[in-house]
Image (cartoon, rainbow, N blue to C red):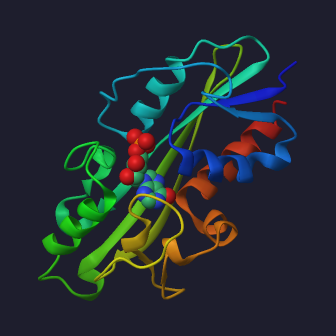
Amino acid sequence: MIDRIIFATENPGKIREVKAILADLGLEVLSLKEAGLTTNVAETGDTFEANAILKVKAVAADDHTIVMADDSGLEVDALGKEPGVYSARYLGEDTSYRVKNQAIIDRLSEKTGLERSARFVCVIAALLPNGNILTARGTIEGVIGYEERGEGGFGYDPIFMVPELGRSTAELTAEEKNAISHRGRALTEMKEKLRGIL
Ligand code: IMP
């Protein structure tokens, strides 16, 4: 019987969101660390789907566990969809998001309005004990702001403005972000797929 999900990430911002969104599935949700596991996977894929699948395949789990992972990132249209699958590594993995965010703002200094369009993309992969892999994709459309705003969320949230709300995703409560975010949407779709087999 499947009774737990191990979510393969070491990113505390992601695991917080994932636990909140998956809570109603009725399964225990553990981070890799909480499960006492580590993984070191090279994200060599050039799509979010390929990388999410690489991440779940890198974890050895028992037959009552679903291994889940996401690969996500920010696509800025005026930058040819950069940083995309390289979002975590943009300007170097150890470079602060203050610096990464400012670099994106600077690169868009000539752009206004919809020329600043961008989206967050998230692909979730789930490896079932029988070896089957399910995937689900979610996106949220927005524009890059002119300055960092807000203290919530993580990563590029302070520069990602949601036009309908007039706020950045770092200015939303966790609940508000999860209800509309790329990760929230992908996980909701994944939950529907899992409900069919659990
Ligand atoms: P991954 O861990 O390889 O999937 O890299 C995802 C990266 O995309 C994160 O480290 C962030 O830079 C960015 N990203 C993904 N989702 C979000 C989000 O919800 N808010 C802000 N940045 C995000």
Tell me residue 94's x, y (percent): 28, 44
Residue 188 seen anywhere in this rendered image of the structure: yes
Q: Is residue 153 above or below residue 65?
A: below
Against 86, residue 169 (above or below) is below
Q: Quadrant of the C terminus?
A: top right
Q: Position of residue 73 (x, y in %)?
A: 39, 52
Dividing the image into 4 quarters, which one contains the N terminus?
top right
Residue drawn at the location 30% of the way across and 81% of the way down: 147
Q: How many marks?
A: 0
Which of the pair 11/114 is nearer the observer? 11
For the point 49% across and 50% down, which residue is it? 122
- From the top left corner, tell me how far across and down residue 119 is, in percent: 39, 65
Residue 127 drawn above or below residue 125: above
Q: Residue at x 63, y 53 (%)?
A: 17
Relative depth, front residue between 128 and 196: 128
Quarter where residue 148 is shown: bottom left
Decide if residue 88 is on the left or right side of residue 27.
left
- Residue 126 located left or right of residue 123: right
Q: Looking at the image, which residue is at 76% across and 36% down? A: 194
**Residue 121 appearing in the image:** no
Q: Residue 179: x, y in percent?
A: 67, 67
* Residue 68, image quadrant: top right
